[in-house]
Image (cartoon, grey):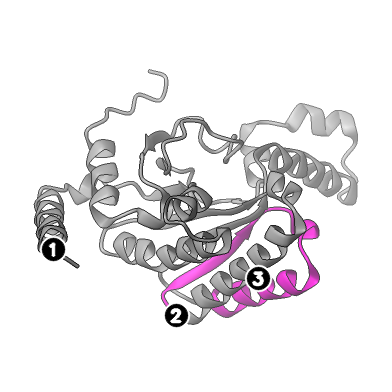
Amino acid sequence: MNLRDKLRGLLVRLYARRVEGHLDHAQVPKHIGVIMDGNRRWARAAGSSTMHGHRAGADKIGEFLGWCSETDVEVVTLWLLSTDNFERPAEELVPLLGIIEDVVRSLAADGRWRVHHVGNLDLLPEDMQRTLKGAQEDTAHVDGITVNVAIGYGGRQEIADAVRSMLLDAHDSGVPLTKLAEAVDIDMIGRHLYTGAQPDPDLVIRTSGEQRLSGFMLWQTAHSEYYFCDVFWPAFRKVDFLRALRDYAARHRRYGG
């Protein structure tokens, strides 16, 4: 590393410390959703392989959760694999699934996070299903940040699964369809989502410069604030995270009022 890079790094750290010093912890979002975008583009820009980009993105997760633990964040949802990602070529998808499975194991072994899967479990290989179930069971007692790992996740799929679950519960309870139709409300559907009784995201961060939802938590983010960052996910820094929190704290959430 040359002198110029060292100086730039020092200035960034000093700036991050300044931003952090002015951060109002009372205004920190309780639930942050993250669309971790840009792994492949980061790898191409670095002249490296796609898998190197995915591994670098996976390595960033622990660092990001560490930043969250320094604030008052209670829930983090990480979008690791969408339902659309299953359309990728097998030579990319199979290693990617292995990397994601390693991420889940690492999160469970860390001891600081309560791991919760959000997504359609039936879409995933049996080995990954077992890993996710084991991670949830092994961390159920942890009194730390709840980390939702969105794997095999799609916003429309979630709503469809919630409606299906609601109908099956009514059938098992012997509730007639007409009675169910009269009882259906927003809260009932919300209870059948993958996130269940969790609070909705206050803030959603998307990296890589893309400014779209791509189906992320369509129901839960009706009143969320979004922060779009030009940095690719593997290059996401603490100062970028703090800027997102500062931007969120400066907004006035009106909830339609």
Residue 244 image position (x, y, % from top left): 29, 43
Taking depth in this image into account, of 194 and 10 the one nearest to the observer is: 10
The amino acid type, in three-letter code, at marker 2 is Gly
Q: Is 227 part of what is drawn in magenta?
A: no
Residue 227 occupies quadrant: top left
Marks 3/2: CA–CA distance: 21 Å
- Report, in whole angstroms, how far the alpha carbon at label 1 lies from the one at label 3: 35 Å
Along the viewing direction, whichever of 228 and 221 lies nearer the viewer: 228
Residue 20 relative to residue 35: left or right: left
Query: Of the residues under marks 3 and 2, which one precedes in the sequence?
Result: 3
The answer to whether 178 is drawn above or below residue 153 in the figure is: above
Residue at 57 percent across and 40 percent down: it is 216
Q: Amino acid type of disc 3?
A: Gly
Is residue 15 rendered to the left or right of residue 136?
left
Q: Which of the labelled discs sits on residue 6, or is there none?
A: 1
**Residue 123 disc label:** none
- Which is more toward the observer, 212 or 87? 87
Identify the magenta region.
Answer: 112-140
Query: Could you tell me the amino acid type at mark 1?
Result: Lys
Q: Position of residue 151 (x, y in %)?
A: 64, 57
Mark closer to the observer (3, 2): 3
